[in-house]
Amino acid sequence: MKTTLKHLTTTAVFAAIATPALAQDIVIGLPNWPSGSATAHVLKVAIETNLGLEVELQNGTNPIFFEGMDSGSVHVHPEVWLPNQQNLHDTFVTEKGSVVMNPNSGTAFQGMCVDTATASAHGIEAIEDLTNPEVAALFDTDGDGLGELWGGATGWAATSIERIRAKSYGYDQTFELQELDDTVAFGNLANAISAGKPWAGFCYTPHYIFSLHDMTVLKEPEHDPAQWNITQPNESPNWLEISSAPVAWDVANFHIHYAKILEQNHPNVAKLLNNASFDVDTVSGFTYALSVEKMDPMDFASKWVLEHEDEVLGWLTN
């Protein structure tokens, strides 16, 4: 199997010599969360190593990546969360047909967490407890009378949904939802736990924090699609007022999405992207390597692709 991969790689290199690849043949979106970033780097290395193409990683947000895949300026979104980006998926995959979804998915959880030491000491068990001013006071770090909790990063669909959920449950009256980069937010969590101070915020898997810290997921009413009425900011200026979600998140799935034009311009890349598959444990390992072990993303991706040669070959040949 390794000989076959070596042969395939050599063939791709000769092809690249015969027809020199232009810089930035493929552009992969680089999300601002650990698992998405890691997956982007792995795909970059897999494509460059085996297909002899130049791959650029481009920072951006979910709408920018989808609009780019539609126009051809971006070719890949490495990790689309559904239902979080359902509106973008519906527009560009279902309606316009300019973007393709990889059928393989990983299953994810999303919710609200409190560090277990604080939850146990103060009897914080359910999300409704956040509406209690005495509970909120525990998380008030600036003395303004409101607790602070992390509501997600700027540009995430989940961040808007968490604001909707806070309004729906009523803890928007007792807490300020902070928008911070994922790395900053979970750095704050680590510092709070080290200092014996409370922390509350949005939490999700796959993520390394559950390997490092003892966290309590707050209980909520089960997900009910009939009560999950979400409008995103790009859909209406009154998105917050007209939305409501007083129930738990549904089970989420994450998929690779790619520009359909790749099927014509770079069919081998399209095949790789359509076959690639990462389960939750694998992606959790990605986040741990980058965020906890502090591995350089390219070094990590190169090591992972080398150690999973047979798997990557399967993406190219199946």
Image (tube, rainbow, N blue to C red):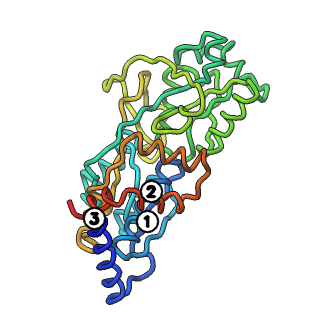
Disc 2 and disc 1 in contact, CB within 8 angstroms: yes
Residue type at the position of mark 3 = Ala
Residue at the disc numbered 2? 304
Residue type at the position of mark 2 = Trp
Side of 152 relative to 248 (left or right) = right
CA distance separating discs 2 and 3: 21 Å
x, y percentage for residue 31? 50, 54
State the SS at label 2: helix
The first of marks 2 and 1 along the sequence is 1
- Which numbered disc, 2 or 1, marks the residue closer to the eye? 2
Disc 2 and disc 3 in contact, CB within 8 angstroms: no
Q: Can you tell which quarter of the image residue 116 is in?
A: top right
Residue type at the position of mark 1 = Val
Label at residue 210:
none
State the SS at label 1: helix
x, y percentage for residue 2? 31, 65
Residue at the disc numbered 3? 270
The first of marks 3 and 1 along the sequence is 1
Q: Residue furthest bottom?
A: 18
Nearer the observer, 4 or 89: 4
Above or below 111: residue 98: below
Label at residue 45:
1
Residue at (51, 22) in percent of width and height: 217
Above or below 252: residue 49: below
Above or below 132: residue 306: below
Residue at (71, 19) in percent of width and height: 138
x, y percentage for residue 77? 40, 57
Label 2 neighbourhood size at 10 Å, few (<14), some (14-19), many (20+)?
some
